[in-house]
Amino acid sequence: MSRLDYHWYKWRAVVALVLGRRRYAMALFADMVRLWPQDRYALSSLAHQQAQAGQFDDALVHSGRLVELAPDDARAWFNHGFMLESAGRLEEARDAFERSTVLSPKLDRAWYGLGLVLIRLHRFDEAVQALERNTELQPMSPYGWYQLARVQLERQQPEAALKIIRHLQGFEPKVAAQLERETGLKAGQPSH
């Protein structure tokens, strides 16, 4: 098969995705992986489509192959970690997210993913560290702040959670209000 054939497959798969024909696109990506088993784009695309379809075991086969081929690719490790977490393989997901953060310390999504996995593992002190790094890298994104506030409550640190709620009031008042509703904490009042 030539590079022209490769680009013909890739073009048809992209058009299929644009037209909402995900199954057809997935079949084309699977053909590409069969024909070009070392191709990182094909592996990544197939794994992504399989994960979107809820086929996490199949997605993990392909994302696992991708990190074997590209062990220094932080984004591949991040995606692999996300798929592992979705499959409930939390310790492996933690390892993948940690690998991603080592390879690319400024990849905020990897720090966020690591924080979420650590929460699920009830490793709250470590989750705080990961989420604090995420909020340093993405200070205007409410997601890390929201999870950080929730973790602080799990750690019995309501003052730290209130401080986060007050901070969120400055740029994401809806998220701050949601946290107040969910936690019963009021940013204008001291905690008990």
Image (cartoon, grey):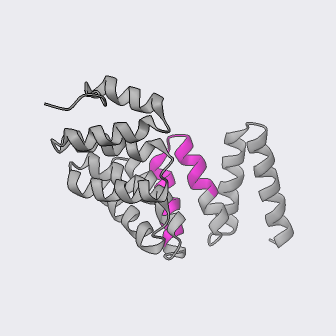
Q: Is residue 101 visible?
A: yes
What x and y, as percent, mark residue 39?
65, 69
Instruction: Give the magenta part as a residue range.
Output: 45-67
Residue placed farthest to the left in the image? 192
Position above or below: 167 against 131: above
Q: Residue at x 72, y 52 (%)?
A: 28
Judge by depth and name the residue closer to the eye, 128 or 8. Answer: 128
Q: Residue at x 50, y 68 (%)?
A: 74
Q: Is residue 123 visible?
A: no
Left or right: 49, with 25 as reference point: left
Position above or below: 109 against 5: above
The prevailing secondary structure element of the residues shown in magenta is: helix
Left or right: 32, with 189 as reference point: right
What x and y, as percent, mark residue 120?
27, 46
Magenta span has 1?
no
Judge by depth and name the residue closer to the eye, 26 or 157. Answer: 157
Judge by depth and name the residue closer to the eye, 148 or 119. Answer: 148
Magenta span has 47?
yes
Judge by depth and name the residue closer to the eye, 80 or 177. Answer: 177
Left or right: 157, with 65 as reference point: left
What x and y, as percent, mark residue 45?
63, 56
Left or right: 12, with 131 as reference point: right
The quadrant of the image that shows the C terminus is top left
The quadrant of the image that shows the N terminus is bottom right
Residue placed farthest to the right in the image? 4
What x and y, as percent, mark residue 24?
72, 43
